[in-house]
Image (tube, rainbow, N blue to C red):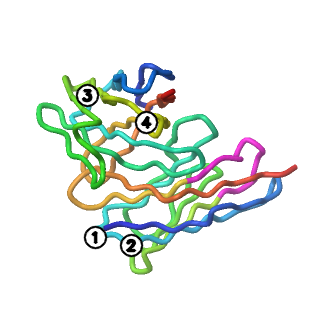
Amino acid sequence: GAVVSQHPSWVICKSGTSVKIECRSLDFQATTMFWYRQFPKQSLMLMATSNEGSKATYEQGVEKDKFLINHASLTLSTLTVTSAHPEDSSFYICSAPKGRGAYNEQFFGPGTRLTVL
Amino acid sequence: GQSLEQPSEVTAVEGAIVQINCTYQTSGFYGLSWYQQHDGGAPTFLSYNALDGLEETGRFSSFLSRSDSYGYLLLQELQMKDSASYFCAVRNTGGFKTIFGAGTRLFVKA
């Protein structure tokens, strides 16, 4: 199957700092990538859709100025958590769909665990 | 908007069969997917139903009834390694966006 990587796999930062998370599709091109956030024992909540060459589309309630998304190329999307606070501590997962038409499979990265002190 | 409902927990014994149900409400429907997630790991794709009926992949099968807005995941010959969270997810029309249910934690006992 296709491979999606994330970097870093975990990060600890101080409150008020910014953290950048990278998501790469390693063996396919992804014009669209998705960013999810997951709190312990909860579901994956879609934060935004990252679109190559255009602005990201954010879900209702997600602050676009706090969670900056850049889709720099067909294989790379980055999520920057600006001025992070302890409540931003979570598991951040990206995914990329591969396939055409009615069927496609979402390939998920391994996730990035963010802890804000 | 979209909403999905699935049981929060299911417990079964090794070798048994378990069915995890999912009902959904969505404005536009393009397909129902199932994902498995072990603690600390990322979700992995299990199956996808765009049309009514049963899809079988090894020990796992998934069923969809669009008229009932209902689907289920069937796991056969349960193994200890199947202990994980299972999420149903819907794709709405117009894109690849996928919305996940709350997840069902499956505990497989010896």
Residue A15 higher or lower than A43, as above or below: above
Mark pair 4, 2: CA separation:
25 Å
Q: Which residue is mark 3?
A: A29
Q: Which residue is mark 1?
A: B27
Marker disc for residue B25: 2
The one nearer the camera, B53 or A6, is A6
Give amino acid for label 3: Gln
Q: Nearer the viewer, mark 1 or mark 4?
A: 4
- Which SS class for mark 2? strand
Name the spot of residue B7 as percent of width and height, x first: 61, 66
The residue shown at (38%, 30%) is A84
Label 2 marks which chain's residue? B
- Which SS class for mark 1? loop
- Which residue is outermost to the front? A16
Name the spot of residue B23 as percent of width and height, x first: 49, 72
Give amino acid for label 4: Ile
Residue B85 higher or lower than B71, as above or below: above
